[in-house]
Image: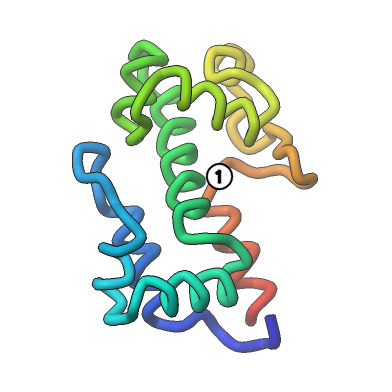
Amino acid sequence: MDGRTLDERVRRAVKVMESVGATSPVTEAALAFSAHLSVSRFAHLFREQTGMAPLQMLRLIKLKNATKLLLDTRLAIKEIGFLAGFGSAASFVRFFKRRYGMTPREYRRCNCDDRVPIRNGGVGSGAGLALQEKQAAVE
């Protein structure tokens, strides 16, 4: 990252990711279309601008939404996984544990929102923080 701000097309794609509900699956092709780019150019630009693939960012956004549901509701873990956009409870738990180092149930029990350690160092609660960190590094 060389001091530039995020490309408007990348910002638009992130907004699409954040606004789409779990019942509307998002594909890289759909994101590329919304950015008026080919899939390969979009994937390259997105990774260049954010340091991660579009679907990685989408997964972070889903996880962030899940953490909010875990702390703000008493819904079942399986239901939260579905509402956040994961295809199965198993995939939700697997990705959650990989990201936060604990299961969704443990996360809910500790009720420590922004103090949860993230596996790659630092602290935070998901995609919003990841994007803010990337934007801060760019600006």
Which residue is at the far left? 23
Q: Nearer the viewer, residue 123 or 17?
A: 17
Residue type at mark 1: give it: Gly
Q: Residue, x 31% and y 55% (percent of image)?
A: 27
Q: Is residue 73 left or right of residue 91?
A: left
- Where is residue 37 drawn, in percent x and y? 33, 80
Q: Secondary structure at mark 1?
A: loop
Q: Is residue 29 left or right of residue 128?
A: left
Against 68, residue 7 (above or below) is below
Q: Is residue 33 left or right of residue 71?
A: left
Q: Residue, x 48% and y 31% (percent of image)?
A: 67
In this figure, which residue is indicated by the disc labeled 1?
126
Q: Residue, x 63% and y 38% (percent of image)?
A: 114
Against 113, residue 35 (above or below) is below
Q: Nearer the viewer, residue 90 or 21?
A: 90
Against 24, residue 41 (above or below) is below
